[in-house]
Amino acid sequence: MAAVSFTYTVAPPAGTPEATFNGSPVPTSSTITAPVAPAAAASDSRSPTDAFYAAAAPALRAAQLDLMDALSSWKDSVGDREKAIENVKVEKGKGKAARMMMATKAADAEESDDEDEDEDGDGSEE
């Protein structure tokens, strides 16, 4: 029988309490598997591929929900412990989006400078 599987491994920082979900401990490494029910016979309006994916969707969703529960439990357990690792002060207007926008503007300006140097289109400089 077909199945959908997710494997995860987390490496929490030192001193992190054990993660729990509904009172049960959550392992740091696990594989979550959900069986895919056999697809119903394809009708005239559905292809066999469509029937398979329709049958696989509930299994995929079940495995995804289990994975989200496990990872959310670890996220809650870790809490703010990783903030010290990523403690980078970013001034207003200096974030990733602003840096990407400035890089794009610089590339556009460089491109337009290249076009200005060769306005006559023959590839030679005078």
Image (spheres, grey):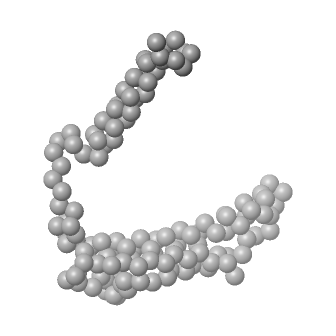
Q: Is residue 7 left or right of residue 104?
A: right
Q: Quadrant of residue 77?
A: bottom left
Q: Is residue 10 left or right of residue 46?
A: left
Vertical relation: 126 (above or below) 9:
above
Q: Is residue 22 visible?
A: no
Q: Is residue 20 left or right of residue 119?
A: left
Q: Residue 71 appears at what percent x and percent y?
A: 37, 73
Image point 49% across, 70% down: which residue? 64
Image point 49% across, 78% down: which residue? 7
Image point 29% across, 46% down: which residue? 96
Image point 31% across, 83% down: which residue? 20
Vertical relation: 96 (above or below) 125:
below
Q: Pick whichever, 116 or 28, lies toward us.
A: 116
Q: Pick whichever, 125 or 57, lies toward us.
A: 125
Vertical relation: 117 (above or below) 80:
above
Q: Is residue 41 visible?
A: yes
Q: Residue 82 appears at what percent x and percent y?
A: 22, 69
Q: Residue 21 appears at what percent x and percent y?
A: 34, 81
Name of the residue lying farthest toward the right: 44
Which quarter of the rendering shows the N terminus? bottom right
